Image: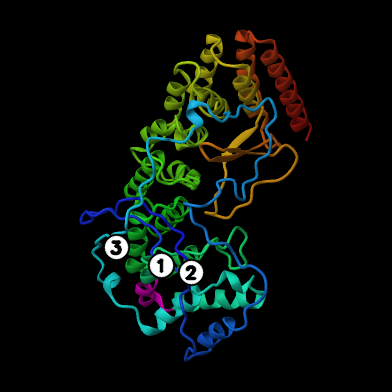
Amino acid sequence: MKDPLQNPRAGRGPKAKAETVRSPVRNGLLLALVAVGCVAGYQLWKWRQGPPPGPLSKLVDPANQDPQTERAAAAPSADVAVVQPGSPADSDDASGPETEVEPVNQPVALPVEGLSLEPSPYTRQLVATLTDLDPGRGPLTPEQSEQWKAGLQVLVQQGSSAVPAIREFLEQNRDLDLGPGSSLGYPSVRAGLLDALQQIGGPEAQALMLQTLQITSMPSEIARLARYLELQGPGQFRTEIGTAVRETLAQAAGGQLRGWDVGPLFQVLQTYSDAATVAALEKSAPKWNYYSALALANLPTGEGVPSLIRLAQESPGTTARGVALEALAQVAIQYPNASAALVELARSGKFSERNWLTAVAALGGERYFIRDSGVEDAPVPTGSGVRNYHLEASNQNFYSIPPWGGMSPEQINERVGIIDQLLAVSSSPAVTQALQNTRASLLTKGQQASAN
């Protein structure tokens, strides 16, 4: 199994002083041991015999990965504001070439003695068998997939004694991408082992998850670990989660994570926010305008709205400014300061028709979401009006869904009230027409809701 991970993020923790960087360290396949002295072990051994035909999966190397691979990019219609390639906020940071650093395998010190234990031969063999997936063998049969899942459960049943064996594999900085919708139920081998830690629970598993969070630079892995740690101890690890995300975003902004989609990091910030989240999102807006604006808009209790207002009041011509306007429209009925700012910004006349047309669509109920990048393996909704977007230079992936219903008469009236205020100050015929059309559509929906 090749090493697809490149981790340029420094190790963290009170005693972690050496920079930990992931780069390819091993080539070739991991030779699994054969013969396990129990029924479950025998099933795993049987699964490894006789490779089926066809490709199994693709090893991912972010240094060589084509950023366009497996990305659905629907051409947006003219009324949606999408940053064009080459604009200042949608360009890669070209501050200097990437520097490959040899890994320093110095794990973060944690006060859990179980992490330093040697794996038992049995648990080491279980992990070796689970991770011995050869792309040349072809796709797994349903029987083989079930045997792999059974083997993972055997590992989980070992409890805390399985943690050292899992740690041993994680520290090898290796993974195998299984792709979305994998028959094994996970997008990668590492994801399966991390889920095993979550199922095992307890202080040893928790400490290993925290250690991995502190040294990994994979955005989807950080998001997965954040979710697992939150399940283990709600609210206990917000500081560590926020630190991991902010440091990784800083490195991505410096060009050290080329090829990786950082969308999962913004999803983490909007879900598990801490005191430094708002400032981090506002700082990220020039490079990841949509990710930052959508995360700010979705922070609980509206604490991101003042930042959106500040971004929208920036000098004309910045793409972050226009996207902030659109995000304010999306949450205008939730927060009075957002709707008041929207009217004042309309009165200023400093935004393009494209920005306002998108904002009007948001007032009508259209919503934008950061695309899931393998964290939950959740599919993007399908149906009429769903649109997917990919911004090439900044590698942002998001989608929008139309107003499919579900608005109460009160919500419809609130939207109509905001639209009426905007109509009073609108100076663009195209925007005025869009506002009138959206108003009429909302009133029709309100009448239908009342009739039902």
Residue bearing the label numbered 3: 105
Instruction: Check the image and report above or below for 330 versus 356.
Output: below
Residue bearing the label numbered 2: 1
Q: What's drawn in magenta, residue-wise?
A: 158-166
Q: Position of residue 45 (x, y in %)?
A: 54, 85
Q: Earlier in the sequence, mark 1 or mark 3?
A: 1
Q: Earlier in the sequence, mark 1 or mark 2?
A: 2
Q: Residue at x 47, y 71 (%)?
A: 28
Q: Does residue 357 appear in this view? A: yes
Mark 3: amino acid: Asn
Mark sitting on residue 450: none
- Answer whether labels 1 and 2 touch (C-beta < 8 Å): yes
Q: Quadrant of residue 332?
A: top right
Instruction: Check the image and report above or below for 402 versus 265.
Output: above
Q: Quadrant of residue 14?
A: bottom left
Q: Position of residue 358 (x, y in %)?
A: 63, 25
* Viewer-proximal residue among 310 and 3: 3
Q: Position of residue 405 (x, y in %)?
A: 70, 36
- Give the tally of numbered discs: 3
